Amino acid sequence: MEEKENTPKNPEEEIEKNETQEETETSSSSTAQDENNELEKKVEELNVKAEENYSLYLRTLADMENLRKRLIREKQESEKYTLEKFMKSLLPVIDSLDKALAGEKEESSNRQMELEEGLKLVSKQFMNVLVQNGLHPIESVDQKFNPDYHQALQKIESQDISEETVKDEYIKGYLLNERLLRPAMVSVIIPKAKNDK
């Protein structure tokens, strides 16, 4: 009896059943293939997105490094020129010391000689401290006139020179860490015009 139950009642039903199964399997296989393609497409999109994010991360990292370097450079510049106001306020003191030392020599007693030596020592020590802090005097006398470092208070014509040259320095000029703090106030010898006789 069991054999009868397993045998198909109708061969046409069996063929239809098999075709339905094949269609289901084909449909199922097609659906699986579509899902697989869709998953591969999503994976590809995610990979592209991941690459974009990684690229953005690298650019952001580079921007942060550049910002860090710029901030360090700006901080160093700020520290370098913090003393500028202080140094400017000391310039009149230097000028006074220089004038006292350059005063006309009178017949001096021992006291005057001691005072002069003391002033020279103080001036030298004071300049050493300023130089250690980045202040440097501008050499002017007998140098080529440079409007970036010299301010001409007087111009004197001469046929003996071919270029503008500093003759005298009235007030010394200074650089603070290679930046002009104050130009030197000078008199300048300029070449005499050829048609002036």
Image (cartoon, rainbow, N blue to C red):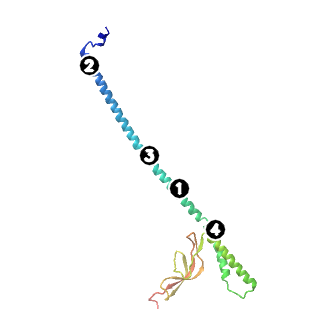
- Image spot of residue 42 (x, y percent): 38, 38
Q: Which residue is mark 2?
A: 16
Label 2 close to label 1 by CB (< 8 Å) = no
Spatial CA distance of label 4 from label 2 is 104 Å
Instruction: Indicate which disc, 4 or 3, sits on the residue closer to the N terminus.
Output: 3
- Of the 4 image quadrants, the one containing the N terminus is top left
Spatial CA distance of label 4 from label 3 is 51 Å
Label 1 Cα crowd, 10 Å radius (few <14 / some 14-19 / many 20+)? few
Identity of the amino acid at label 4?
Phe
Instruction: Indicate which disc, 2 or 1, sits on the residue closer to the N terminus.
Output: 2
Label 2 close to label 3 by CB (< 8 Å) = no
Instruction: State the residue at coordinates (35%, 32%).
Output: 35
Q: Which residue is mark 1?
A: 68
- Image spot of residue 119 (x, y percent): 70, 78
Q: Is residue 193 left or right of residue 92?
A: left
Spatial CA distance of label 4 from label 1 is 29 Å
Q: Which residue is mark 3?
A: 53
Instruction: State the residue at coordinates (31%, 24%).
Output: 24
